[in-house]
Amino acid sequence: MEVELPDIKSENITILMHENSFYIKAFSKTVEYLGSFFLDGPVDPEKAIAVNDNGMLTIKVPYKEGFMCARYVPIE
């Protein structure tokens, strides 16, 4: 997931990751950003990685092992 956070320093960003959602709070002198995001399956918060590069926050987190996002269901 990518979130644009122009002019916000990494030390002013908080990410709280749950198994099925996460929350971002970020601020600068002129703006405050709050966001809640729901994920399409259970993830492993312990393996989450976040990078703030020139105002673009990139968050990567793997799905829990054994989780399938979707599958086709055969019709009998």
Image (cartoon, grey):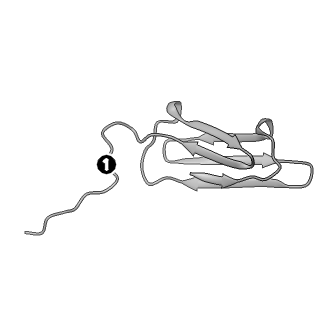
Q: Which residue is mark 1?
A: 68
Helix, strand or loop for disc 1: loop
Q: Residue at x 46, y 36 (%)?
A: 44
The residue under label 1 is which amino acid type? Met
- In the picture, measured across the screen, residue 15 lies left or right of residue 1, that is right
Q: Residue at x 86, y 55 (%)?
A: 31
In this view, the residue farthest toward the right is 29
Residue 42 percent location from the top left of the image: 43, 44
Q: Quadrant of the C terminus?
A: bottom left
In this view, the residue farthest toward the bottom is 75
In this view, the residue farthest toward the left is 76
In this view, the residue farthest toward the front is 54
Q: Residues within 10 Å of mark 1 (few under 14, many from 20)?
A: few
Q: Residue at x 74, y 49 (%)?
A: 55
- In the picture, measured across the screen, residue 61 lies left or right of residue 56, that is left
Residue 5 percent location from the top left of the image: 75, 52
- In the picture, measured across the screen, residue 48 lies left or right of residue 54, that is left
- In the picture, measured across the screen, residue 27 lies left or right of residue 60, that is right
Q: Residue at x 61, y 46 (%)?
A: 58
In the image, residue 42 above or below residue 74: above
Residue 39 percent location from the top left of the image: 49, 52
